[in-house]
């Protein structure tokens, strides 16, 4: 019985052994590719170790504001301009300066933009910067139409990053919109008049000034009139109107002239006085001529009017044609420099043209008395 059981069980043992042998044989075949695992693992381990070593070698923090500016992208020439306008930035807090420059970089501003900003607003980096920049930039993108225009507006008026969005910017935009200057037109005016948001103020008297110009809201000039009146003081506007009334104009005539030429309200009282005195006193023309030729008020007295009047006298003295007299003189004053030279100088023979050109350039070199000694340089915004 025992032998019988032994022989009966032997096939199962043999079958099991054979299965185990087959199993290990298959596993051995399947694990042949695993022979490369140790080498791959070693390579990975070496690479990770190298990366870890590189991560450990971090850039040293900036020691001063100069290093902060340079790492941000400023060159030595940029730093020279920045520190010349704001020397205190040399001793600025490194951490605070870095955080502000990071904000500006996220907005899309670069070193060139920063130089322009500091040139106009030397204390710009000394101010605190309000949050909610995402909401502000989204509103500006809708207002100006593109990111490029937004950056241009910020460089022209950095205070756009500091004005209260909900209590300052949006109410002013809504005010102009209610007066017939839509957002697109407002954005155009804001580009040329950075102080439009800060200085806008309307009252009944100013509304009456706009009405006196007689310009309808559909006119292209309407937005210029409204914005110029909006940012100007009432006393200033009255003074400029009174200045022209001294030369015999009626108040209604002055405002009608403003309606045709709104930038008249941006000219200094002294400039208007000198030009009008020259027109009436030297040229012996009636003051009313400026109603048809506003260029007589806008033109530079020293660089345009006087030299061209002297040139007209020289041409008349030499008996040349065409002469610059009567309506031709008024047109010559209004012309661009290039066109004036072409029409009244280059049209003559070479030797004559050369003589006229030398005379004209000499006439342009005559400067107003004490003008060269002026030291004041206007680095700020024009409005």
Image: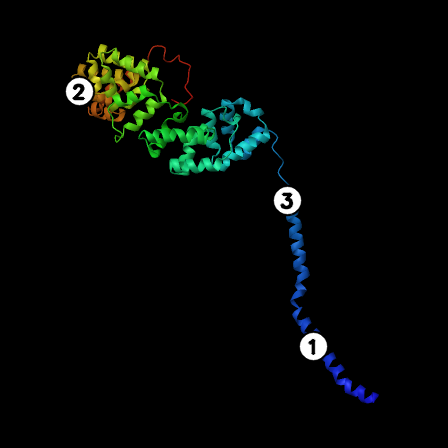
Residue 29 lies, in percent from the top left, at 66, 72
Numbered label attached to residue 22: 1
Residue annotated with mark 2? 327
Q: Nearer the viewer, residue 248 or 50?
A: 248
For disc 3, the neighbor class at 10 Å (few under 14, some 14 to 19, many from 20) is: few
Image quadrant where residue 54 sits: top right
Q: Is residue 260 above or below residue 39?
A: above
Please give left or right for residue 98 compared with residue 181 in the image. right
Dot 3: what SS? helix
Numbered label attached to residue 55: 3
* Quadrant containing the N terminus in the rendered view: bottom right
For disc 1, the neighbor class at 10 Å (few under 14, some 14 to 19, many from 20) is: few
Please give left or right for residue 190 compared with residue 289 in the image. right
Q: At 37% from the left edge and 31% from the top edge, which residue is drawn?
A: 174
Dot 1: what SS? helix
Q: CA distance from mark 3 to mark 2?
A: 79 Å
Q: CA distance from mark 3 to mark 1?
A: 50 Å
Query: Is label 3 in contact with label 1 (beta carbons under 8 Å)?
Result: no
Q: Which-is-in-front pick, marks 2 and 1?
A: 1
Q: Is residue 261 above or below residue 72?
A: above
């Amino acid at each position: 019985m025992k032998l019988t059981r032994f022989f009966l069980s032997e096939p199962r043992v043999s079958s099991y052994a054979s299965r185990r042998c087959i199993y290990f044989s298959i596993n051995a075949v399947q694990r042949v590719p695993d022979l490369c695992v140790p080498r791959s693992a070693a390579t990975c381990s070496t690479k990770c170790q190298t990366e870890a070593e590189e991560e450990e070698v971090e850039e040293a923090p900036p020691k001063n504001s100069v290093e902060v500016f340079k790492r941000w992208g400023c060159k030595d020439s940029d730093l020279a301009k920045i520190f010349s306008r704001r020397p205190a930035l040399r001793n600025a807090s490194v951490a605070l300066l870095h955080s502000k420059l990071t904000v500006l970089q996220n907005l899309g501003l670069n070193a060139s933009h920063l130089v322009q900003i500091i040139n106009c607003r030397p204390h710009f980096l000394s101010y605190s910067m309000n949050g909610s920049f995402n909401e502000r930039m989204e509103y500006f993108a809708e207002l100006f139409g593109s990111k490029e225009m937004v950056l241009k507006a910020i460089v022209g008026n950095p205070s756009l990053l500091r004005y209260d969005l909900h209590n300052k910017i949006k109410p002013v935009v809504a005010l102009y919109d209610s007066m017939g200057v839509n957002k697109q037109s407002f954005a155009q005016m804001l580009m040329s008049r950075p102080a439009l948001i800060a200085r806008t103020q309307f009252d009944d008297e100013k509304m009456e000034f706009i009405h006196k110009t007689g310009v309808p809201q559909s006119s292209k000039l309407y937005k210029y009139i409204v914005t110029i009146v909006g940012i100007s003081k009432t006393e200033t506007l009255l003074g400029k109107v009174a200045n022209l009334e001294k030369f015999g104009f009626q108040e209604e005539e002055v405002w009608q002239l403003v309606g045709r030429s709104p930038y008249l309200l941006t000219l200094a009282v002294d400039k208007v006085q000198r030009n009008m005195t020259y027109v009436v006193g030297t040229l012996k023309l009636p003051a009313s001529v400026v109603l048809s030729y506003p260029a007589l008020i806008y033109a530079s007295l020293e660089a345009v009017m006087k030299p061209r009047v002297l040139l007209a006298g020289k041409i008349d003295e030499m008996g040349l044609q065409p002469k610059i007299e009567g309506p031709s003189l008024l047109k010559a004053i209004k012309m661009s420099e290039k066109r004036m030279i072409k029409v009244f100088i280059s049209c003559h023979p070479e030797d004559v043209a050369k003589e006229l050109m030398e005379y004209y350039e000499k006439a342009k070199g005559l400067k107003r008395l004490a003008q060269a000694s002026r030291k004041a340089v206007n680095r700020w915004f024009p409005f």
